[in-house]
Structure formats: C-alpha cells, structure tokens
Amino acid sequence: EIYNEFASYIIYRAALSTTHKKLTEDKKLTLVYFGGSVTSGYGATNNDAYSWRALIGKWLAKEYPDAEITNINRALGESGTYLGTHRVQSDIISAKPDLLFIEYSINDCYYNSTYEEAASQFETIIREVKRALPDTDIVTILVTDSYRLAENYEGKLHLQAQAHEDIARAYNSPTGHVGRALAAHVK
C-alpha cells in the first residue's frame, strides 16, 4: 500500500537487472549507500534502524529472505559531490557493490555549487563507478529541506538536484524524488 502511494515519485528508467539477478539467482547482494548526513541518518532516533538506508536494507531482507544482503554505509555528513569525487575508489569501488544509492543534492545546495559544478562532480562519481564496475546498478536519491518544500511541491527541483537528475537521466539511471514525496505529504 505504501509502495503504491509513493510509486509516482520514482523515475524508473533502466531496470535494476544486476540487483534482480543477485537477489533472485545468486542470492547475494552488496549495497553501498553514498551520500551526506541524510544518508547517514541524521535526525533519526536510531540511524541503523530508522534511516532511509536502514529501511531499504530491512525491506530487501524481508522481500528476499533467502538472499545474503550486505549493506555498507559510506555516508559522510556535511559532504557533497566535490568530496565524493575523491572518495569513489576507497568508498565505492573497493566495496564492489551490485547496487549503489547516491544522495548528495541537498549538500551541494548548501555548498552553493553551481549547476555545472554539481552536474560535473556527480557525473564524475557515476562515470568512475561505471568504468570500474559496469554492472553496478545506480540509483540517485534527491532530497530537500524545509526551505525548498514549496519548490518541490510545484514539481520543481532546486538547482543542484536538477543537475543530479539530468545526469541520472543521461546515464539512464533510476531516481527517487524523496523531496517531492515529502513536500506532497507535508502539505
């Protein structure tokens, strides 16, 4: 029921074929969550139980009980794509994930990144992962804050989120518009 309520905030694009194969055939999936404080779970009463990354991990474990699922948290509060570009090898590629979630748009906004900076840095992360691990599925997560809820409610994205969305589209990668979902439900 909840899935149907929020399905319209997911831009599916290419299927997560590696993820599907790993869960249904290989029965082994490695996920990396890469982002800022939102990904680390800032504000959750228990980061490892109630953050969005923890809830995704729990959902996958429930839906695929026969699969061995490894969730790796590589979130670093107050970081944006600029720092993320310097952490790709050590935090993502070295872990060899089958599925990668990236969330940095709101921190790029806080750092006043231009559209070009946010797009270029986000693309650097995606390109390096795709070059080293071409079968890794990548999902972009776009979040917002209380100052940008109205913009999201109108179906718009803040500048840096738009840059990330444009790169995700160029790489045919799915996007979760969490900021839009939040804005719609807060209103």
Image (cartoon, rainbow, N blue to C red):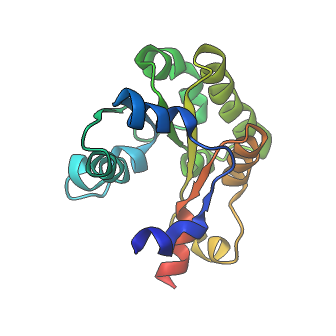
Picture residue at 38% right of the left edge, 26% below the top: 26
Res. 74 visible in picture? no
Picture residue at 45% right of the left edge, 42% below the top: 36
Query: Is 143 placed above or below 182 here?
Result: above
x%, y% of residue 144?
Answer: 54, 61
Outermost residue to the bottom: 187
Picture residue at 52% right of the left edge, 62% below the top: 178
x%, y% of residue 157?
Answer: 69, 62
Q: Is residue 166 left or right of residue 90?
A: right
- Name the quarter where the N terminus is drawn: bottom left
Q: Give whichever of 12, 20 is nearer the camera.
A: 20
x%, y% of residue 17?
Answer: 56, 36
Query: Is 79 placed above or below 49 here?
Result: above
Res. 169 visible in picture? yes
Query: Is 52 placed above or below 17 here?
Result: below
Can you tell which quarter of the image residue 73 is in? top left
Mark count: 0
Q: Give whichever of 139, 20 is nearer the camera.
A: 20
Can you tell which quarter of the image residue 135 is in? top right
Q: Is residue 139 left or right of residue 163?
A: left
Q: Is residue 33 left or right of residue 11?
A: left
x%, y% of residue 171?
Answer: 73, 37
Picture residue at 53% right of the left edge, 70% below the top: 181
